[in-house]
Image (tube, rainbow, N blue to C red):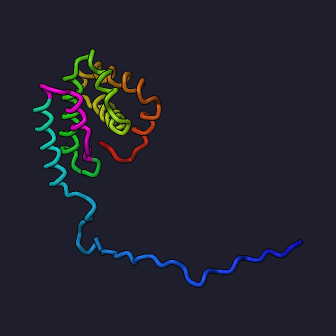
Amino acid sequence: PVPFHAPPCPPHFPTFPQIQHTNTEQKGTNPLMSSEEEISAAVNARKGKVAGMLSGDKTSALRVALTDPPVTSKNPDTKAINCNTVGDVITAVGESDIDSVIEKLEMAECDVLMKYIYKLLGDTSHSDKSGVMLKWHAKLLKKTGMGSIVRSMTDRKTV
């Protein structure tokens, strides 16, 4: 057998820039996370914007409602406001237009929409809209397949 000889190490290894670490515990906030007030303000602004869009292009209204869901919020009221905003758009879309709206959505938007459909189906205050939600679910499933259901149920970031 021939003995194994490792190749010689290069004279110097590349150096990497030093990463500056900040002590976020000392400040009390995480600079990457928005505050509850900022999240709530964004959700309320989105609600107003979507309400103004409902008389026009429903696809654009749904896209705005699905943009940046408040997954980091700990406030259930903030999450409920955004959920109701999505629900308002879903119920405003006519049954004959559901397919065309869903076809214009990106896959990530479809995953977020699936989360909201499940949340709306589980909310007793929206039980009168469950038929509409099930129609959306069936048509969304047709586009995305089972993957969207799995992703929406296993994602720890709740809407």
Classify the position of the N terminus by image quarter. Answer: bottom right
User: Where residue 8 appears, x then y in whole percent?
Assistant: 68, 80
Classify the position of the C terminus by image quarter. Answer: top left
Name which quarter of the figure residue 57 lies in. Answer: top left
Classify 89 as above or below 41. above
Residue toward you, 102 or 159: 102
Query: As drawn, is 56 to the left or to the right of 90?
Result: left
Q: Residue at x 33, y 32 (%)?
A: 118
- Residue 64 covered by magenta stretch: yes
Q: Residue at x 13, y 49 (%)?
A: 41
Query: As drawn, is 75 to the left or to the right of 19?
Result: left
Residue toward you, 82 or 14: 14
Q: Residue at x 14, y 28 (%)?
A: 54
Name which quarter of the figure residue 25 lies in. Answer: bottom left
Which stretch is magenta? 54-70
Query: As drawn, is 139 to the left or to the right of 128?
Result: right
- Return the residue found at the far top: 96
Q: Residue at x 25, y 24 (%)?
A: 127
